[in-house]
Image (tube, helix red, strand yellow):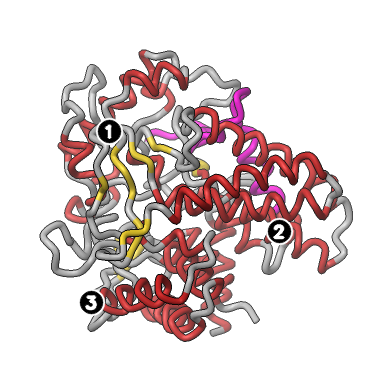
Amino acid sequence: MTKHFDEAYRILAANDRGGYTVPTDRLYPFQWNWDSAFVAMGFATFDIDRAYRELERLTEGQWADGMIPHIVFHQPSDTYFPGPDVWRTSHTIPTSGITQPPVFGMALRAVHEAAEKAGTKNAKARTLALFQAGLKWHRWWYKARDPDGTGLVALLHPWESGSDNSPAWDIALARVPTTTDTAVVRKDTGHVDAAMRPRDEDYRRFIHLVDTYAACGWDPVKQWEKTPFKVAEVQTTGILLKAGEDLEHIAKSLGLEAEAQELANYNDLTHKALLAQWRPELSRFVSRDLISGEDIEAPTQAGFIPLLGLDLGGGMVDAAVAEMKLWSNDMKVAFPTTKPFVESWEPKRYWRGPAWAIINWLLIDGLNRNSQPEMAEALRLSTVNAIEKEGFAEYFDPTTGEGCGGLGFSWTAAAYLWLSRD
Protein backbone atom coordinates (compact mmCIF):
# COMPACT_ATOMS: atom_id res chain seq x y z
CA MET A 1 0.00 0.00 0.00
CA THR A 2 2.91 2.38 0.69
CA LYS A 3 3.92 2.45 -2.99
CA HIS A 4 0.34 3.36 -3.97
CA PHE A 5 0.33 6.23 -1.48
CA ASP A 6 3.64 7.41 -2.91
CA GLU A 7 2.22 7.26 -6.43
CA ALA A 8 -0.88 9.21 -5.35
CA TYR A 9 1.34 11.94 -3.87
CA ARG A 10 3.45 11.95 -7.05
CA ILE A 11 0.38 12.41 -9.27
CA LEU A 12 -0.90 15.35 -7.23
CA ALA A 13 2.55 16.94 -7.36
CA ALA A 14 2.84 16.35 -11.12
CA ASN A 15 -0.58 17.90 -11.75
CA ASP A 16 0.08 20.95 -9.54
CA ARG A 17 0.13 24.16 -11.57
CA GLY A 18 0.83 26.62 -8.76
CA GLY A 19 -1.70 26.18 -5.98
CA TYR A 20 -4.32 24.48 -8.15
CA THR A 21 -4.38 20.99 -9.62
CA VAL A 22 -5.30 20.01 -13.17
CA PRO A 23 -7.26 16.74 -13.45
CA THR A 24 -4.58 15.29 -15.75
CA ASP A 25 -2.01 16.69 -18.16
CA ARG A 26 -3.13 17.75 -21.67
CA LEU A 27 -6.63 16.17 -21.63
CA TYR A 28 -7.78 18.60 -18.90
CA PRO A 29 -5.15 21.38 -18.58
CA PHE A 30 -7.16 23.82 -16.40
CA GLN A 31 -8.79 23.91 -12.95
CA TRP A 32 -12.08 22.04 -12.82
CA ASN A 33 -14.59 22.84 -10.09
CA TRP A 34 -15.68 19.57 -8.52
CA ASP A 35 -12.36 17.92 -9.33
CA SER A 36 -10.62 20.51 -7.15
CA ALA A 37 -13.05 19.98 -4.29
CA PHE A 38 -12.25 16.26 -4.21
CA VAL A 39 -8.55 17.02 -4.62
CA ALA A 40 -8.67 19.42 -1.65
CA MET A 41 -10.03 16.60 0.53
CA GLY A 42 -7.21 14.39 -0.68
CA PHE A 43 -4.68 17.08 0.25
CA ALA A 44 -6.35 17.44 3.67
CA THR A 45 -5.02 13.98 4.56
CA PHE A 46 -1.41 15.20 4.44
CA ASP A 47 -1.01 18.92 3.54
CA ILE A 48 -3.63 21.24 5.02
CA ASP A 49 -2.13 24.45 3.66
CA ARG A 50 -2.22 23.03 0.13
CA ALA A 51 -5.81 21.85 0.67
CA TYR A 52 -6.90 25.38 1.55
CA ARG A 53 -4.94 26.75 -1.41
CA GLU A 54 -6.79 24.46 -3.84
CA LEU A 55 -10.13 25.92 -2.77
CA GLU A 56 -8.81 29.48 -2.64
CA ARG A 57 -7.54 29.26 -6.22
CA LEU A 58 -10.94 27.92 -7.31
CA THR A 59 -12.76 30.89 -5.77
CA GLU A 60 -10.59 33.25 -7.83
CA GLY A 61 -12.96 32.28 -10.64
CA GLN A 62 -16.16 33.08 -8.70
CA TRP A 63 -18.50 35.47 -10.51
CA ALA A 64 -20.02 38.57 -8.93
CA ASP A 65 -23.44 36.85 -8.78
CA GLY A 66 -21.94 33.98 -6.74
CA MET A 67 -21.56 31.26 -9.36
CA ILE A 68 -18.32 29.27 -9.24
CA PRO A 69 -17.73 28.16 -12.85
CA HIS A 70 -16.93 24.63 -13.89
CA ILE A 71 -13.56 25.64 -15.41
CA VAL A 72 -11.11 28.38 -14.39
CA PHE A 73 -8.59 29.10 -17.17
CA HIS A 74 -5.68 30.31 -15.02
CA GLN A 75 -3.13 29.78 -17.82
CA PRO A 76 -3.56 29.34 -21.60
CA SER A 77 -3.39 25.90 -23.21
CA ASP A 78 -4.14 24.68 -26.72
CA THR A 79 -4.75 21.04 -25.76
CA TYR A 80 -8.44 21.46 -24.75
CA PHE A 81 -11.67 22.46 -26.49
CA PRO A 82 -13.75 24.55 -25.82
CA GLY A 83 -11.38 27.22 -24.54
CA PRO A 84 -12.08 30.79 -23.35
CA ASP A 85 -12.67 32.05 -26.91
CA VAL A 86 -15.72 29.78 -27.20
CA TRP A 87 -17.19 30.64 -23.80
CA ARG A 88 -16.91 34.42 -24.29
CA THR A 89 -17.43 35.23 -20.62
CA SER A 90 -16.35 38.54 -19.08
CA HIS A 91 -14.92 37.49 -15.71
CA THR A 92 -11.52 38.99 -14.75
CA ILE A 93 -9.90 35.54 -15.00
CA PRO A 94 -11.20 33.62 -18.06
CA THR A 95 -13.75 30.99 -17.02
CA SER A 96 -16.45 28.84 -18.52
CA GLY A 97 -20.02 30.13 -18.18
CA ILE A 98 -21.64 27.15 -16.45
CA THR A 99 -21.11 25.48 -13.08
CA GLN A 100 -20.62 21.97 -11.62
CA PRO A 101 -21.85 19.97 -8.60
CA PRO A 102 -21.17 21.98 -5.39
CA VAL A 103 -18.84 19.54 -3.64
CA PHE A 104 -17.00 22.70 -2.44
CA GLY A 105 -19.00 22.90 0.82
CA MET A 106 -18.22 19.28 1.65
CA ALA A 107 -14.54 19.86 0.94
CA LEU A 108 -14.41 23.00 3.06
CA ARG A 109 -15.76 21.18 6.09
CA ALA A 110 -13.25 18.34 5.59
CA VAL A 111 -10.35 20.80 5.31
CA HIS A 112 -11.57 22.92 8.24
CA GLU A 113 -11.90 19.89 10.53
CA ALA A 114 -8.47 18.59 9.51
CA ALA A 115 -7.03 22.03 10.26
CA GLU A 116 -8.73 22.19 13.66
CA LYS A 117 -7.45 18.72 14.54
CA ALA A 118 -3.91 19.71 13.53
CA GLY A 119 -4.05 23.11 15.24
CA THR A 120 -3.22 24.86 11.96
CA LYS A 121 -2.47 28.60 12.21
CA ASN A 122 -4.85 31.04 10.45
CA ALA A 123 -7.26 28.17 9.75
CA LYS A 124 -10.30 30.03 11.09
CA ALA A 125 -9.69 33.10 8.91
CA ARG A 126 -9.13 30.97 5.80
CA THR A 127 -12.23 28.91 6.51
CA LEU A 128 -14.31 32.05 7.03
CA ALA A 129 -13.30 33.56 3.68
CA LEU A 130 -14.04 30.31 1.86
CA PHE A 131 -17.31 29.89 3.76
CA GLN A 132 -18.49 33.27 2.47
CA ALA A 133 -17.67 32.17 -1.10
CA GLY A 134 -19.54 28.89 -0.56
CA LEU A 135 -22.59 30.67 0.88
CA LYS A 136 -22.69 33.07 -2.09
CA TRP A 137 -22.62 30.08 -4.42
CA HIS A 138 -25.48 28.35 -2.58
CA ARG A 139 -27.54 31.52 -2.81
CA TRP A 140 -26.84 31.55 -6.56
CA TRP A 141 -28.05 27.95 -6.93
CA TYR A 142 -31.37 28.70 -5.26
CA LYS A 143 -31.91 32.00 -7.10
CA ALA A 144 -30.62 31.17 -10.59
CA ARG A 145 -31.42 27.45 -10.80
CA ASP A 146 -34.56 27.17 -8.67
CA PRO A 147 -36.38 30.46 -9.32
CA ASP A 148 -39.74 28.86 -8.45
CA GLY A 149 -38.52 27.78 -5.00
CA THR A 150 -39.13 24.05 -5.43
CA GLY A 151 -36.04 22.92 -3.52
CA LEU A 152 -34.66 21.02 -6.55
CA VAL A 153 -31.96 22.81 -8.54
CA ALA A 154 -31.84 22.61 -12.33
CA LEU A 155 -29.01 22.09 -14.78
CA LEU A 156 -28.96 23.95 -18.08
CA HIS A 157 -26.10 21.93 -19.58
CA PRO A 158 -25.16 18.24 -19.20
CA TRP A 159 -21.60 19.29 -18.30
CA GLU A 160 -22.98 20.92 -15.13
CA SER A 161 -23.81 17.48 -13.76
CA GLY A 162 -20.21 16.29 -14.13
CA SER A 163 -21.79 13.22 -15.82
CA ASP A 164 -21.43 14.75 -19.26
CA ASN A 165 -22.88 12.16 -21.64
CA SER A 166 -24.94 10.10 -19.19
CA PRO A 167 -27.96 8.22 -20.60
CA ALA A 168 -29.94 10.43 -18.20
CA TRP A 169 -29.71 13.21 -20.82
CA ASP A 170 -30.57 11.23 -23.96
CA ILE A 171 -34.20 12.32 -24.25
CA ALA A 172 -33.72 15.91 -23.09
CA LEU A 173 -30.55 16.41 -25.15
CA ALA A 174 -32.23 15.08 -28.31
CA ARG A 175 -34.31 18.30 -28.32
CA VAL A 176 -31.14 20.41 -28.54
CA PRO A 177 -30.18 21.23 -32.15
CA THR A 178 -26.84 20.01 -33.50
CA THR A 179 -26.34 23.32 -35.31
CA THR A 180 -23.61 25.64 -34.03
CA ASP A 181 -21.77 28.71 -35.32
CA THR A 182 -18.69 27.54 -33.43
CA ALA A 183 -16.16 25.35 -35.21
CA VAL A 184 -16.16 22.16 -33.13
CA VAL A 185 -12.49 21.17 -33.05
CA ARG A 186 -12.32 18.35 -30.55
CA LYS A 187 -9.03 17.81 -28.74
CA ASP A 188 -10.13 15.06 -26.31
CA THR A 189 -10.09 12.30 -28.92
CA GLY A 190 -6.46 13.11 -29.65
CA HIS A 191 -5.58 12.20 -26.05
CA VAL A 192 -7.99 9.31 -25.40
CA ASP A 193 -9.55 6.56 -27.54
CA ALA A 194 -12.67 8.03 -29.19
CA ALA A 195 -14.60 4.89 -28.19
CA MET A 196 -14.27 6.06 -24.56
CA ARG A 197 -15.47 9.63 -25.22
CA PRO A 198 -18.82 11.34 -25.99
CA ARG A 199 -19.93 11.09 -29.61
CA ASP A 200 -19.55 13.96 -32.10
CA GLU A 201 -23.31 14.49 -32.20
CA ASP A 202 -23.33 14.98 -28.41
CA TYR A 203 -20.54 17.53 -28.72
CA ARG A 204 -22.42 19.60 -31.29
CA ARG A 205 -25.41 19.75 -28.95
CA PHE A 206 -23.13 20.69 -26.02
CA ILE A 207 -21.66 23.56 -28.03
CA HIS A 208 -25.11 24.68 -29.30
CA LEU A 209 -26.05 25.24 -25.64
CA VAL A 210 -22.84 27.21 -25.03
CA ASP A 211 -23.64 29.41 -28.06
CA THR A 212 -27.20 29.93 -26.80
CA TYR A 213 -26.07 31.12 -23.37
CA ALA A 214 -23.26 33.29 -24.70
CA ALA A 215 -25.90 35.01 -26.86
CA CYS A 216 -27.82 35.67 -23.60
CA GLY A 217 -24.75 37.43 -22.20
CA TRP A 218 -24.67 34.67 -19.57
CA ASP A 219 -27.66 36.30 -17.83
CA PRO A 220 -29.28 33.56 -15.67
CA VAL A 221 -32.83 34.88 -16.19
CA LYS A 222 -32.46 34.96 -19.98
CA GLN A 223 -30.81 31.53 -19.98
CA TRP A 224 -33.71 30.07 -17.96
CA GLU A 225 -36.16 31.43 -20.55
CA LYS A 226 -34.23 30.46 -23.69
CA THR A 227 -32.79 27.06 -22.85
CA PRO A 228 -33.96 23.91 -24.64
CA PHE A 229 -32.33 21.83 -21.85
CA LYS A 230 -33.58 22.22 -18.26
CA VAL A 231 -33.37 19.31 -15.81
CA ALA A 232 -34.09 19.32 -12.06
CA GLU A 233 -31.35 16.86 -11.19
CA VAL A 234 -31.14 14.61 -8.13
CA GLN A 235 -27.37 14.02 -8.14
CA THR A 236 -26.54 17.73 -8.07
CA THR A 237 -29.38 18.47 -5.64
CA GLY A 238 -28.23 15.67 -3.32
CA ILE A 239 -24.70 17.08 -3.33
CA LEU A 240 -26.09 20.59 -2.76
CA LEU A 241 -28.01 19.35 0.30
CA LYS A 242 -24.97 17.63 1.82
CA ALA A 243 -22.77 20.65 1.08
CA GLY A 244 -25.46 22.89 2.56
CA GLU A 245 -25.47 20.81 5.75
CA ASP A 246 -21.68 21.07 5.92
CA LEU A 247 -21.75 24.86 5.41
CA GLU A 248 -24.46 25.12 8.08
CA HIS A 249 -22.20 23.14 10.45
CA ILE A 250 -19.30 25.51 9.72
CA ALA A 251 -21.53 28.56 10.24
CA LYS A 252 -22.53 27.27 13.67
CA SER A 253 -18.92 26.49 14.60
CA LEU A 254 -17.93 30.06 13.62
CA GLY A 255 -20.84 31.62 15.52
CA LEU A 256 -22.60 32.84 12.36
CA GLU A 257 -26.18 32.35 13.53
CA ALA A 258 -28.01 34.22 10.75
CA GLU A 259 -26.05 32.41 8.04
CA ALA A 260 -26.63 29.06 9.75
CA GLN A 261 -30.39 29.72 9.80
CA GLU A 262 -30.40 30.75 6.14
CA LEU A 263 -28.66 27.52 5.18
CA ALA A 264 -30.97 25.48 7.43
CA ASN A 265 -33.96 26.94 5.54
CA TYR A 266 -32.45 25.97 2.18
CA ASN A 267 -31.63 22.50 3.48
CA ASP A 268 -35.12 21.90 4.84
CA LEU A 269 -36.70 22.88 1.53
CA THR A 270 -34.37 20.63 -0.48
CA HIS A 271 -34.70 17.72 1.95
CA LYS A 272 -38.46 17.60 1.36
CA ALA A 273 -38.11 18.07 -2.40
CA LEU A 274 -35.56 15.26 -2.79
CA LEU A 275 -37.66 12.79 -0.79
CA ALA A 276 -40.54 13.47 -3.20
CA GLN A 277 -38.33 12.24 -6.08
CA TRP A 278 -38.14 8.69 -4.67
CA ARG A 279 -39.86 6.14 -6.90
CA PRO A 280 -40.55 2.88 -5.02
CA GLU A 281 -41.22 0.95 -8.24
CA LEU A 282 -37.66 1.79 -9.39
CA SER A 283 -35.99 1.60 -5.94
CA ARG A 284 -34.18 4.89 -6.60
CA PHE A 285 -34.62 8.63 -7.00
CA VAL A 286 -35.36 10.27 -10.34
CA SER A 287 -34.60 13.63 -11.90
CA ARG A 288 -37.28 15.65 -13.71
CA ASP A 289 -37.21 17.10 -17.21
CA LEU A 290 -38.57 20.62 -16.67
CA ILE A 291 -39.30 21.11 -20.38
CA SER A 292 -41.54 18.05 -20.74
CA GLY A 293 -42.51 17.80 -17.05
CA GLU A 294 -41.70 14.08 -17.07
CA ASP A 295 -39.55 11.92 -14.80
CA ILE A 296 -36.15 10.89 -16.15
CA GLU A 297 -36.18 7.14 -15.59
CA ALA A 298 -32.84 6.30 -17.24
CA PRO A 299 -31.10 4.04 -14.68
CA THR A 300 -27.90 5.86 -13.66
CA GLN A 301 -25.83 6.35 -10.51
CA ALA A 302 -27.60 9.71 -9.94
CA GLY A 303 -30.58 7.79 -8.55
CA PHE A 304 -28.58 6.79 -5.46
CA ILE A 305 -26.56 9.95 -4.76
CA PRO A 306 -29.37 11.52 -2.64
CA LEU A 307 -28.37 9.03 0.11
CA LEU A 308 -25.55 11.51 0.69
CA GLY A 309 -27.89 14.14 2.11
CA LEU A 310 -30.89 12.15 3.38
CA ASP A 311 -31.62 9.91 6.35
CA LEU A 312 -33.95 7.38 4.77
CA GLY A 313 -36.40 5.09 6.49
CA GLY A 314 -35.58 1.39 6.64
CA GLY A 315 -37.79 0.34 3.73
CA MET A 316 -36.40 2.94 1.35
CA VAL A 317 -32.75 2.36 2.17
CA ASP A 318 -33.18 -1.43 2.03
CA ALA A 319 -34.74 -1.12 -1.42
CA ALA A 320 -32.00 1.22 -2.66
CA VAL A 321 -29.23 -1.05 -1.36
CA ALA A 322 -30.87 -4.14 -2.89
CA GLU A 323 -30.99 -2.34 -6.24
CA MET A 324 -27.36 -1.24 -5.92
CA LYS A 325 -26.33 -4.84 -5.19
CA LEU A 326 -28.25 -5.99 -8.27
CA TRP A 327 -26.28 -3.52 -10.43
CA SER A 328 -22.99 -4.67 -8.86
CA ASN A 329 -23.53 -8.41 -9.34
CA ASP A 330 -20.73 -10.03 -11.34
CA MET A 331 -18.94 -6.70 -11.84
CA LYS A 332 -15.14 -6.71 -11.43
CA VAL A 333 -15.39 -3.10 -10.17
CA ALA A 334 -18.45 -1.51 -8.61
CA PHE A 335 -20.31 0.85 -9.00
CA PRO A 336 -21.44 1.07 -12.65
CA THR A 337 -22.80 4.50 -13.59
CA THR A 338 -25.49 2.94 -15.80
CA LYS A 339 -27.43 -0.19 -14.93
CA PRO A 340 -25.61 -3.10 -16.62
CA PHE A 341 -27.07 -4.62 -19.76
CA VAL A 342 -29.75 -2.00 -20.43
CA GLU A 343 -29.73 -0.69 -24.01
CA SER A 344 -27.82 2.51 -23.19
CA TRP A 345 -25.07 0.79 -21.16
CA GLU A 346 -21.52 1.11 -22.54
CA PRO A 347 -18.99 -0.02 -19.92
CA LYS A 348 -16.03 1.86 -21.45
CA ARG A 349 -17.67 5.07 -22.70
CA TYR A 350 -17.25 7.93 -20.24
CA TRP A 351 -20.45 8.35 -18.17
CA ARG A 352 -22.48 5.61 -19.85
CA GLY A 353 -21.40 2.73 -17.60
CA PRO A 354 -17.88 2.94 -16.14
CA ALA A 355 -17.12 3.00 -12.41
CA TRP A 356 -15.61 6.22 -11.01
CA ALA A 357 -13.73 6.49 -7.71
CA ILE A 358 -15.34 9.83 -6.83
CA ILE A 359 -18.89 8.57 -7.45
CA ASN A 360 -18.07 5.61 -5.21
CA TRP A 361 -16.74 8.03 -2.58
CA LEU A 362 -20.09 9.88 -2.56
CA LEU A 363 -22.04 6.62 -2.45
CA ILE A 364 -19.87 5.29 0.40
CA ASP A 365 -20.60 8.44 2.43
CA GLY A 366 -24.30 8.08 1.68
CA LEU A 367 -24.36 4.40 2.62
CA ASN A 368 -22.53 5.04 5.89
CA ARG A 369 -24.90 7.87 6.71
CA ASN A 370 -27.82 5.49 6.21
CA SER A 371 -26.36 2.75 8.43
CA GLN A 372 -25.21 0.46 5.62
CA PRO A 373 -21.59 -0.18 6.65
CA GLU A 374 -21.29 -3.55 4.88
CA MET A 375 -22.26 -2.22 1.46
CA ALA A 376 -20.12 0.88 2.06
CA GLU A 377 -17.09 -1.23 2.91
CA ALA A 378 -17.62 -3.52 -0.10
CA LEU A 379 -17.70 -0.46 -2.36
CA ARG A 380 -14.63 1.04 -0.67
CA LEU A 381 -12.63 -2.17 -1.13
CA SER A 382 -13.74 -2.48 -4.76
CA THR A 383 -12.51 1.06 -5.43
CA VAL A 384 -9.19 0.74 -3.61
CA ASN A 385 -8.47 -2.65 -5.20
CA ALA A 386 -9.20 -1.36 -8.69
CA ILE A 387 -6.77 1.52 -8.22
CA GLU A 388 -4.06 -0.71 -6.75
CA LYS A 389 -4.42 -3.14 -9.65
CA GLU A 390 -4.95 -0.76 -12.60
CA GLY A 391 -3.46 2.52 -11.44
CA PHE A 392 -4.88 6.02 -11.08
CA ALA A 393 -7.10 6.03 -14.17
CA GLU A 394 -9.94 8.48 -14.75
CA TYR A 395 -12.45 5.63 -14.48
CA PHE A 396 -12.73 1.83 -14.74
CA ASP A 397 -14.55 -0.62 -16.97
CA PRO A 398 -16.73 -2.42 -14.39
CA THR A 399 -16.81 -5.66 -16.40
CA THR A 400 -13.05 -6.09 -16.88
CA GLY A 401 -11.60 -3.76 -14.23
CA GLU A 402 -9.51 -2.01 -16.92
CA GLY A 403 -8.45 1.57 -16.19
CA CYS A 404 -9.87 3.87 -18.89
CA GLY A 405 -9.89 7.52 -19.96
CA GLY A 406 -7.13 9.83 -18.77
CA LEU A 407 -4.28 8.39 -16.70
CA GLY A 408 -2.42 9.85 -13.71
CA PHE A 409 -5.75 11.34 -12.63
CA SER A 410 -5.85 13.75 -9.71
CA TRP A 411 -9.25 12.96 -8.25
CA THR A 412 -8.57 9.24 -8.39
CA ALA A 413 -5.37 9.87 -6.41
CA ALA A 414 -7.33 12.00 -3.93
CA ALA A 415 -10.02 9.33 -3.61
CA TYR A 416 -7.36 6.70 -2.90
CA LEU A 417 -5.81 8.84 -0.16
CA TRP A 418 -9.22 9.55 1.39
CA LEU A 419 -10.62 6.02 1.17
CA SER A 420 -7.38 4.42 2.42
CA ARG A 421 -6.83 6.78 5.36
CA ASP A 422 -6.97 5.45 8.90
Residue 89 in magenta stretch: no
Which residue is pictured at 68% across the width and 61% down the height?
Answer: 110
Report the span colored magenta. 52-78
Reading the image, the residue beneath label 3 is: 400
For the C terminus, give its image quadrant.
bottom right
On the question of residue 408 being in view, the answer is: no
Query: How crowded is the residue under tag 1: few (<14 C-alpha within 10 Å), some, or many (20+)?
Result: many
Distance Cα–Cα, label 3 vs label 1? 30 Å
The quadrant the N terminus occupies is: bottom right
- Looking at the image, tell me whether mark 1 or mark 2 is earlier in sequence order: 2
Instruction: Residue at the far left: name it.
Output: 343
Q: Nearer the viewer, residue 243 or 7?
A: 243
The spot of residue 106 in percent (x, y) is 61, 55
Closer-to-camera residue (147/71):
147
Q: Amino acid at mark 2?
A: Val
Would you name the residue on which mark 2 appears?
Answer: 111
Q: Please report whichever mark, 3 or 2, sits nearer to the chain's N-terminal start.
A: 2
Left or right, 311 with respect to 117, comes to left
* Residue 274 makes an appearance in the image: yes
Q: Which residue is mark 1?
A: 206
Magenta stretch encompasses residue 62 = yes
Q: Give the amino acid at mark 3.
A: Thr
Q: Residues within 10 Å of mark 2 (few under 14, many from 20)?
A: many
Q: Secondary structure at mark 1?
A: helix
